[in-house]
Image (cartoon, grey):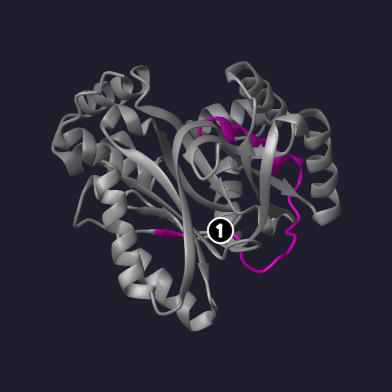
């Protein structure tokens, strides 16, 4: 794949959009010291070239009564067509994240379900159809998972932690809220006037509802999806097993993540391992360096780790 020729201004724009994808173009133009039309052209080019794959709404499903289940698959005798069929099948279910990997796992997907029973039914249907291609499988339940903006795009700038998971609850939202969330889920940078036309209420009413959804924590952030390969980056998942990931160690891990620009996702899980770390780096050497740093910092409480490179993201939709 030919890399997109990204300069420092593009990186600054991407950083600002990844921190808040609803940042007005006028504000971005002031911060990067370019005219508004010039910024618009750069954003449009990065969208048309597939660098920006989506303007991504981040919601916290735990507040809507859902739990997050993560499935790691080792495949056997599965060709590209079989994997495509698996992806197409999962896209129609409650899967909101689906990726192909190279390394410990071949395939990982995440599902939202009301409880273990509902997830079990969904997973058994998947296995009924594709079990002959599954060599091994691991299932983890997500407990809490801070996300972080891509501060590596603009080193020294603000590092933002986004909440995901946490204490189970169920906040009531009405049909209009769901319509607004669905609209933002397709494109979170969409203008409020366009959302109002879609859902059939005034722009001011949409604005008020969005603010309430943000205040309740249902809407956590507005970010961007990136084709990392086009800007010269790679995505790795490292799964760590601890001797005991207690509250003190977890606090230290989060502190470590807040100081490491390349960590973008930090799920604490219940299952075969205790912690997934997703990092975006320029090459495998940087990934190896990260593992060394992590082991140096937490080696006294670590048990083991496994890793895989995420080579293709088929789907990521927090609200679907």
Residue 273 shown in magenta: no
Residue 115 is at least partly visible in this image: no
> Looking at the rendering, which quadrant does residue 156 occupy?
bottom left
Helix, strand or loop at label 1? It is loop
Q: How many marks?
A: 1
> Looking at the rendering, which quadrant does residue 270 occupy?
bottom right
| Residue 133: % across, % down | 70, 30
Residue 171 is at least partly visible in this image: yes
- The residue that label 1 is drawn on is 164
Locate residue 63 relative to residue 287 in the image: left or right: right
Q: Residue at x 66, y 51 (%)?
A: 138
Locate residue 78 relative to residue 311 in the image: left or right: right
Q: Residue at x 58, y 19 (%)?
A: 80
Assign the C terminus to one quadrant of the image.
top right
Question: Which range of residues does the magenta coloring cover?
Answer: 161-189
Camera-side residue of 313 and 240:
240
Camera-side residue of 265 and 14:
265
> Looking at the rendering, which quadrant does residue 296 occupy?
bottom left
């Amino acid at each position: 794949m030919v890399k997109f020729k990204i300069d420092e201004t593009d990186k600054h724009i991407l950083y600002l959009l990844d921190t808040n994808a609803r940042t007005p173009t006028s504000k971005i133009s002031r911060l990067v010291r370019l005219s508004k039309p010039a910024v618009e052209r750069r954003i449009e080019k990065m969208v048309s070239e597939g660098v920006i794959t989506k303007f991504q709404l981040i919601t916290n499903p735990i507040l809507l009564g859902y739990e997050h289940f993560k499935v790691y698959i080792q495949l056997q005798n599965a060709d590209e067509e079989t994997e495509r069929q698996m992806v197409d099948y999962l896209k129609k279910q409650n899967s909101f994240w689906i990726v192909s990997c190279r390394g410990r796992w071949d395939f990982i997907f995440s599902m939202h379900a009301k409880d273990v029973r509902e997830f079990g039914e969904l997973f058994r249907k998947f296995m009924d159809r594709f079990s002959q291609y599954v060599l091994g499988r691991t299932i983890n339940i997500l407990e809490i998972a801070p996300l972080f903006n891509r501060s590596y795009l603009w080193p020294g700038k603000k590092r933002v932690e986004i909440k995901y998971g946490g204490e189970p609850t169920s906040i009531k939202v009405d049909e209009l809220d769901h319509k607004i969330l669905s609209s933002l889920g397709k494109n979170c940078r969409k203008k409020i006037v366009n959302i109002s036309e879609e859902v059939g209420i005034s722009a001011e009413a949409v604005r008020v509802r969005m603010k309430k959804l943000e205040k309740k924590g249902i809407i956590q952030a507005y970010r961007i999806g990136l084709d990392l390969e086009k800007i010269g980056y790679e995505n790795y998942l490292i799964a760590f097993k601890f001797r005991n990931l207690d509250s003190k160690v977890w606090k230290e891990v989060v502190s470590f993540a807040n100081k490491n620009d390349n960590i973008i996702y930090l799920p604490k899980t219940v299952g075969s391992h205790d912690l997934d770390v997703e990092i975006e780096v320029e090459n495998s050497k940087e990934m190896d360096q990260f593992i060394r740093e992590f082991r140096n910092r937490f080696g006294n409480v670590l048990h083991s780790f496994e890793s895989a490179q995420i080579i293709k993201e088929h789907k990521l939709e927090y609200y679907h």
